[in-house]
Image (tube, helix red, strand yellow):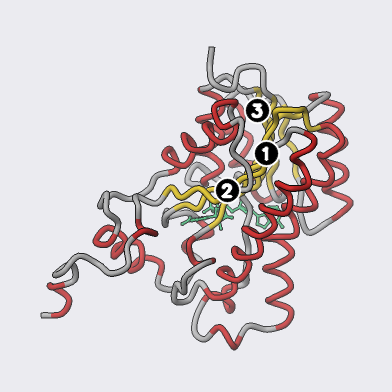
Amino acid sequence: MGLLTGKNAIIFGLANDKSIAWGITQAFAREGARIGISYAGEALEKRVRPLAAQVGADFVEQCDVASDEQIAAVAEKARAHFGEVDILVHSIGFANKDELQGYFYNTSRAGFHLAMDISVYSFVALAKAFQPFLRKGGALLTLTYYGSVKVAPNYNMMGVAKAALEASTRYLARDFGPQGVRVNAISAGPIRTLAAMGVSGFRDMHKSFLEIAPLHEHVTIEDVGNAAVYLCSDWAAKVTGEIHYVDSGYNIMGTPEPGAFKEKQE
Ligand code: NAD
């Protein structure tokens, strides 16, 4: 018996085998969940379908979360397919490249709205669409980053969006509590994915992470997948509204170890 045996899990945000959603999907499949996958659009289909086949997913549906109609359609299909859903994972984020470099004050109105819509509102909208058939004991999960609470240069608009996403997690946790459904977020350390590579200076930040994090190890999509299993399983039955860091301890450090960047300074 796996930790998720008997649970129906639908995962949004799979783009390729580097995606955090893939780490979560594999861990969920290993723990016995029945898997459903949703991806953004046609361009991704040829990458997503073979991955879905690897984990025996029998529900693979496209959904652009910018569209209320597509969200309603995917929810309807999921209800027809699964009857009830236990777990929904939102592993989606987007901001224009212009919004991920330079000064935050240069963020455009349209860029601000777009990042908030795709990276934050979509979690709320998916929660609402799936609410009528989420089973008691179920869990919603989203993915966030430390740039929500501290300044991460160039992360800019996404930092503001992640702050709103974390607040949304707490408000949703309150809403879904009486239904017996928990809502949590994982704050992951930097991982080389398609989305991450869009942030200016990501490579340097990814490298310096190793010097600062107490464990001195990069976070992998497998690490995030395993934490997601815990948060979405009955082992976390009384955990809701939490931002759970999977970041090798990076967020607890106030300053780097003395001499950590010595080579660079010399
Ligand atoms: P990724 O590029 O593999 O995943 C991002 C996903 O968002 C893609 O599948 C993409 O198709 C989807 N998406 C974008 N616009 C969409 C739309 N309109 N409709 C539906 N889907 C859409 O990158 P990732 O790093 O796995 O990102 C997943 C989540 O993890 C994001 O919320 C990201 O901010 C978060 N996160 C990433 C890191 C990191 O360092 N990689 C760290 C912390 C948090």
Mark closer to the chain start, 2 or 3: 3
Quadrant of ligand 1 in image: bottom right
> Compared to 197, does 88 lie above or below?
above
Q: Which residue is mark 1?
A: 182
Q: Residue at x 60, y 71 (%)?
A: 160
Amino acid type of the residue that numbered disc 1 sits on in the rendered structure:
Arg
Looking at the rendered structure, the secondary structure element under dot 1 is strand
Amino acid type of the residue that numbered disc 3 sits on in the rendered structure:
Ile
Measured in 3D between alpha carbons, the distance from the residue under mark 2 to the one under mark 3, in whole angstroms, is 24 Å
Label 2 Cα neighbours within 10 Å, binned few <14 / some 14-19 / many ≥20: some
Measured in 3D between alpha carbons, the distance from the residue under mark 3 to the one under mark 1, in whole angstroms, is 19 Å
**Is residue 89 found left or right of 220 in the rendered image?**
right
Mark closer to the chain start, 2 or 1: 1
Q: Residue at x 25, y 67 (%)?
A: 256
Q: Quadrant of residue 133?
A: top right
The disc placed on residue 242 is 2
Label 3 Cα neighbours within 10 Å, binned few <14 / some 14-19 / many ≥20: many
**Is residue 178 found left or right of 230 in the rendered image?**
right
